[in-house]
């Protein structure tokens, strides 16, 4: 499932977007500390610069549900950078959450929280939502992708091994699907694998190609 929400600002950019004409060349800026997002964006063969501002508030209103949570945060991240963007720069911000039974699982703060999260995911199907926001000084577009992930029943020893040998504290839901726990624990997925890693690159590439003439 993909939800598209597009906003534009500034008559010149809006007209270009609606008319289908190729906009001016853009310099890509990835605003992310995530090594996985950097790896995935690099895999598209695009040149980009990493730019990270410290101390961005990643909280969200309590009433938000599901994919609206990362969408809110991805836009908030973009707002922190927007005033400093050059005219030819296009900023990419993203946020990922794990959603289980109506509750959000963000990054665990401690190994104990990581174990608790993995125990709750064990034997269940959850959703991974990643929101991506594309921002220029004149225009902003955003979308949300959802992937269903089903875990087999995990043994406590398997959870302990993963928490002790990998780095679950920097991952939503306390796991990386590309790591050992994904190899032995994920029974099936419905949707984009790369979305679970933190960046739905196929969808991102289509947006960059079709709306910004970047390929």
Image (cartoon, rainbow, N blue to C red):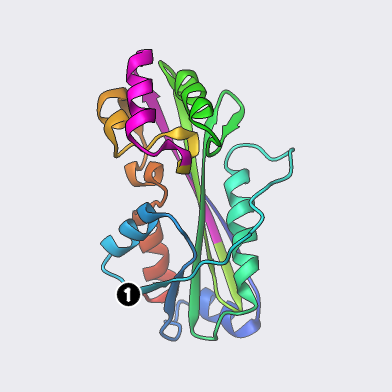
The percent coordinates of residue 108 (x first, y second) are: 53, 35
Q: Residue at x 46, y 22 (%)?
A: 121
- The boundaries of the magenta stretch are 142-169
> Compared with residue 99, is residue 1 higher up or lower down, i.e. above or below?
below
The percent coordinates of residue 147 (x first, y second) are: 42, 37
Q: Residue at x 37, y 45 (%)?
A: 197
Q: Please name whichever residue, 128 or 176, is drawn nearer the observer in this view of the structure.
A: 176
- Image quarter (top left, top right, bottom left or bottom right) of the C terminus: bottom left
Left or right side of 20 for 106: right
Q: Is residue 151 visible?
A: no
Q: Residue at x 47, y 60 (%)?
A: 32
Q: Please name whichever residue, 114 or 90, is drawn nearer the observer in this view of the structure.
A: 114
> Compared with residue 151, is residue 128 higher up or lower down, i.e. above or below?
below
Q: Residue at x 60, y 71 (%)?
A: 81
Q: Which residue is mark 1?
A: 47
Tell whether position 193 is magenta. Answer: no
Dividing the picture into quadrants, the one containing residue 153 is top left
Element marked by disc 1? loop
Q: Please name whichever residue, 72 or 114, is drawn nearer the observer in this view of the structure.
A: 114
Tell whether position 168 is magenta. Answer: yes
> Compared with residue 205, is residue 178 higher up or lower down, i.e. above or below?
above
């Amino acid at each position: 499932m993909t939800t598209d929400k597009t906003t534009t600002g500034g008559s010149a950019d809006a007209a270009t977007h609606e008319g289908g004409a190729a906009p001016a060349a853009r310099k890509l800026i990835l605003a992310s500390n995530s090594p996985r997002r950097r790896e995935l964006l690099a895999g598209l063969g695009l040149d980009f610069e990493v730019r990270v501002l410290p101390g961005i508030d990643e909280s969200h209103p309590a009433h938000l549900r599901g994919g609206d949570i990362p969408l809110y945060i991805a836009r908030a991240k973009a707002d922190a950078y927007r005033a400093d963007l050059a005219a030819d720069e296009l900023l990419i911000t993203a946020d990922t959450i794990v959603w289980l039974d109506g509750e959000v699982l963000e990054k665990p703060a401690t190994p104990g929280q990581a174990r608790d999260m993995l125990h709750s995911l064990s034997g269940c199907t959850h959703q991974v939502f990643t929101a991506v926001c594309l921002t220029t000084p004149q225009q902003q577009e955003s979308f949300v992708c959802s992937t269903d992930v089903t875990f087999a029943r995990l043994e406590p020893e398997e959870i302990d091994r993963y928490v002790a040998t990998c780095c679950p504290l920097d991952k939503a839901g306390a796991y990386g699907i590309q790591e050992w726990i994904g190899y032995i624990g994920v029974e099936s997925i419905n949707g984009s694998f790369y979305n679970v890693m933190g960046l739905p690159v196929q969808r991102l590439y289509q947006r960059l190609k079709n709306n910004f003439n970047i390929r």
